[in-house]
Amino acid sequence: MKETLLHMLKANENEYVSGQDISNVLNCSRTAIWKHVSDLRAAGYEIEAVQKKGYRLLRSPDAVTSEEIMLRLETERLGRKIHYYPSLKSTQEMAHHEAAKADEEGMLVVADEQTGGRGRLGRSWHSPSGTGIWMSLILKPRIPLQKAPQLTLLTAVAVVRAIEKKTGLAADIKWPNDILLNGKKIVGILTELQAEADQIHSVIIGMGMNINQKLEHFQEDIRSIATSLHIESGKEFVRADLIAAVMLEIEELYDIYLKDGFGLIKLLWESRALSLGRRITARSLNGTVKGLAKGITDDGVLLLEDDEGRVHSIYSADIEI
Ligand code: BT5
């Protein structure tokens, strides 16, 4: 209901929508409308109410609520069910919980702030309120376990394409899960699985995107390695716009992937990859390997040729270029 009301107000921005029209569409009383308007105001919408004229939307907050995302969403399946939280320990953790309960895919968990956002290997992900996009998407592809890393690469391509479409900025991908703008990390992707034996039950794709942060929003220890769309462009962006764009890009690529496999995604990924053909250092729990990044396999594994000419398959590592 709140969503429909918002839709009506937005469709008539700067004009009054009469209480009568709203009550006809929503099929509810004037008192109920007033309650919805109060809720929207509490969420940061400036709504003017004038007797005999009706309601007028003056300003919308840069919110990542379900309503704001839904208004912009062009997908068929992904993000059609959204769980929004003003503050949450980790969207990833919540998505794990939801994924275990539901059979359908496409649910999106979004938070305005994370108090315990996480990266890989127990590292933390800084997620202050009102600035970035912290979200986790649940997919349920029928693919073998070893192909799951392909979905991290697919997501990276989708996010880069969405950023380019919405901001004109060209970001690069650093294998496997970093998106960089001018050499600094703007997005981190965390793909986790729920599986039984070798059967995937759910893939949970966490995305942390730095959007409107200023330099001082970043903790000192990551200031030299992190950046945001705002820092790089001087502009502010509507976060819900970017979320809707990311969902659309993921859906388009995911449909291609399910139908035709990884081939096209691999090509798209390679065209954006920063490290291929360069000398890199890969650090993992198994040790450090230095060498030439030769490419990725069809499963999304990085191939690294060391100075003795031996080719290593890297499944998971931190890369220094
Ligand atoms: C990642 O890990 O890059 C994956 C991050 C995934 C975060 C999302 S947010 C929504 C969902 N819910 C969660 O709880 N997580 C996911 P990794 O490659 O391990 O990188 C982590 C490292 O990046 C940290 O150790 C810091 O050095 C750095 N870092 C932390 N916060 C950052 C930020 N906001 N921007 C850029 N770098 C950051």
Image (cartoon, rainbow, N blue to C red):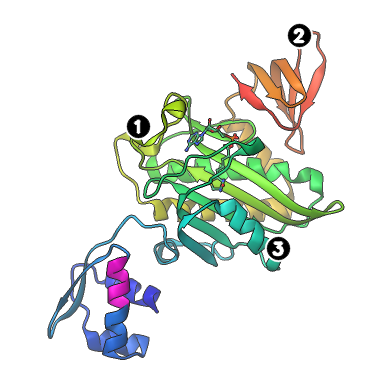
Percent coordinates x, y for residue 225 in the rendering: 47, 26
Name the residue that disc number 2 marks: 307
**Which corner quadrant of the figure contains ligand 1?**
top right
Q: Position of residue 102 (x, y in %)?
A: 68, 68
Residue that label 1 marks: 215
Residue type at the position of mark 2: Asp
Sequence-first disc among 3 and 1:
3
Q: CA distance from mark 2 to mark 1?
A: 39 Å
Q: Which residues are magenta?
A: 36-42
Side of 88 where 319 appears, left or right: right
Q: Are marks 2 and 3 in contact (CB under 8 Å)?
A: no
Residue found 55% across the figure and 51% down from its top: 90
Q: For label 1, count other residues whose C-alpha is less than 10 Å away and answer few (under 14), some (14-19) or many (20+).
A: some
Give the vertical position of 156 relative to 5 (above or below).
above
Q: Which residue is mark 3?
A: 100
For the residues labelled 3 and 1, the Cα–Cα distance comes to 38 Å
Q: Position of residue 221 (x, y in %)?
A: 46, 27
Per the image, label 1 sits on a secondary structure element best described as helix
**Secondary structure state at the residue bearing disc 2:** loop
Taking the spot 30% from the left edge, 80% from the top edge, the residue there is 35
Residue 42 as seen in the image, left or right of residue 210? left
